[in-house]
Image (spheres, helix red, strand yellow):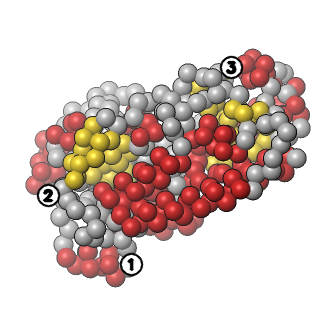
Amino acid sequence: MRTKTIVIIGTALAALTATGCGTDASSEADAKAKGAATATSATTYPFTLENCGTDVTYKAAPKRAVTLNQTAAEILIHLGVGDRIAGTGYEIEKTPPAIAAPYEKIPVLSAPGAEIKHEKLLEAQPDFVYGSFASMFTKEQSGERKQLHDLGVPTYLTEFDCTYHESVANADFTMLFEEYRRLGRIMGVPEAGEKLAAEQKAVVDKAVGAVEKRDKPLKAMWFYSTYEGTPWAAGPGGLPQHVSELVGVENIFADAKTKWAEVSWDEVAARNPDVIILADLTRGEPNDTAEEKIQLLKKDPLTSKLAAVKGDRFITIPGSHMDPGYGSASAVPVLVDGLNKLG
């Protein structure tokens, strides 16, 4: 995720300054006719939020938002403001059928699996930029947050990733649901933020209530990906650790230094998980899919001897659901169901 710095092109900056964030009355009327969520008087502008240690002022409801990644776009769509997304990027999986139609209307500003570059971002003339990864708000990618703020474009970065890969204190669903509320307020649809938070809380609560109690918690490995043969697993300070605690399993890498940790197969074998939770990814990289991970584990002389591997004690979850986003709540009932079936 490192490329050379992009220099701001004057024409793109001029277009951003000249065009601003307005839309004509007919387009807003069309949006209302389609039942889309639009700005309401429930949000009073301007207002300021502290986000990842930065005070950001939002002067009006965004009409040309750019989401730096697919997960961020999906959240705005579920808030009912997908028609106000002027562009998105970093697509890593097939869009869920429930939102495929609105998502397909959004211009994609990057190559598949790649980040939006600063020049391309400015060409979209955004009046708000929202992203789920700190690594995207850099000079090498979409531009630093201060750089965008100086151009008059407010931003929002998920509080789960204020600093790339670092563990986050109190990373839990409460934090995610607060993000929905904040985005609802930013977009001028606070009721939608409250509604989405309540709906997803109900999903999580119902799943947790269905957990079958055990005398001893199962040891679990959250297996995300491999890089040059080295496994990456969930550590502390992220949603996987929080979900582990909710459903009563022991994350074998809860003592890692980061929320996503580069571990070793020797460590995995030594900690001997009872169950392996697989991230099913469709980025096209080696061992990304759940099936590829299973084959890797079964062919490796060391991991093939693990009880979890020999017993096919695997639970598969979409990879994006392990990062904070709309799909994270639905990962809980899938995990609970899988754990209950293990007996």
Q: Which mark is residue 141?
A: none
Q: Quadrant of residue 218?
A: top right
For marks 2 and 3, give the one nearer the viewer. Answer: 3
Marks 1/3 in contact by CB < 8 Å: the verdict is no
| C-alpha separation, residue under disc 1 versus residue under disc 3 | 51 Å
Residue matched to label 2: 19
Looking at the image, is 174 positioned above or below residue 216? below
Depicted 41 relative to depicted 68: above or below: below
Residue labelled with disc 1: 35
Residue 121 visible, this orientation = no
Q: Percent from the top left, x then y, of residue 310? A: 89, 34
- Cα–Cα gap, marks 1 and 2: 26 Å
- Image point 36% across, 55% down: which residue? 183
**Lower position in the chain sequence, tag 1 or tag 3:** 1
Q: Tag on residue 264?
A: 3
Name the residue type under label 1. Gly
Query: Callout 2: helix, strand or loop?
Result: helix
Nearest to N terminus: mark 2 or mark 3: 2
Q: Which structural element holds mark 3?
A: loop
Mark 2 and mark 3: Cα distance apart in space: 52 Å
Image quarter of the N terminus: top left
Dot 3 amino acid type: Ser
